[in-house]
Amino acid sequence: MATTGTAAFNLEFTELAEEAWERAGREMRSGYDLRTARRSLNLLTIELANRGINLWTIEQGTIPLVQGTNTYALPADTIDLLEHVIRTSPGVTNSQADLNITRISVSTYSTIPNKLVQGRPIQVWIQRLRDAPQVTVWPTPDQGTVGSPYYTLVYWRMRRIQDAGSGVETEDVPFRFLPVLASGLAYQIAMKTPELMQRVPMLQAEYEKQFELAAGEDREKAAIRFVPRQQFLGGGTI
């Protein structure tokens, strides 16, 4: 028999809510059932961000650095930065270079004697504030012109998963995570519906199973090489 020839299955929010209610043991019957499912789904996507790195939410961004300015705002939906470099002479053929910049803690930054000394930034402190994260580089940039910055902070960030839709939108997850959303939403619905409480353990187990399957596939598959670090003790190495 012929196959469909397509691989585009997805779920609109309303369909996802219906699936979750049915898994929980009841049909979705009212507008309130839909609203409470939307609220639970938004909380569920926040939980997914807390569980670890979701590869589809990694985005690259840039911040042109200004001479004499060391603190810059990140996009408001930024969860954290994963990688960062300082790019010198951006856009200049054969002159552009990406240089490593080390992330430091607030404790390390606080002990820097002169935080306004200027030079090529070699360290970055990330402040994960409530409304919008900020980055502070050190040393403070010593070069930069309007429209043609000498230094650019290039970063790879993990952003928030977009909010649940109002009905016809699909969710901001790859198809591999649709079973996670359906099972996780069913679990959350059952937790706040008294007549479905007896299904909570089963739904929780299914949710954890689906998450482990999806998270196990949604991982970096590049080769990793571990190099032992040498320590010098008494003139020798170990």
Image (spheres, rainbow, N blue to C red):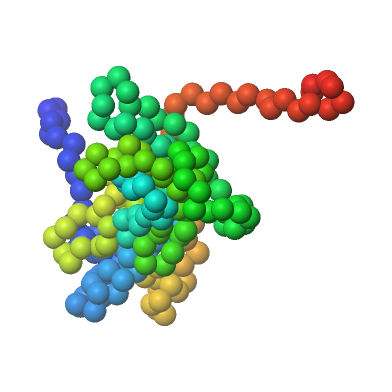
Hey, which residue is sitting farthest right in the picture? 234
Residue 98 place in picture, x, y as percent: 39, 30
> Which residue is at the front of the view, 62 or 181?
62
Q: Residue at x 29, y 32 (%)?
A: 90
Q: Residue at x 36, y 41 (%)?
A: 143
Residue 160 place in picture, x, y as percent: 34, 56
Number of marks present in the image shown: 0
Looking at the rendering, in which quadrant would you find the C terminus? Answer: top right
> Which residue is at the front of the view, 78 or 1?
78
Q: Quadrant of residue 133?
A: bottom left
In the rendered view, does 110 fall on the left or right side of 176? right
Up-down relation of residue 5 to residue 123 (above or below):
above
Q: Quadrant of residue 19?
A: bottom left
In the rendered view, does 97 fall on the left or right side of 228? left
Residue 106 place in picture, x, y as percent: 57, 57
Q: Quadrant of residue 170?
A: bottom left
Up-down relation of residue 192 to residue 112 (above or below):
below
> Which residue is at the front of the view, 13 or 30?
13
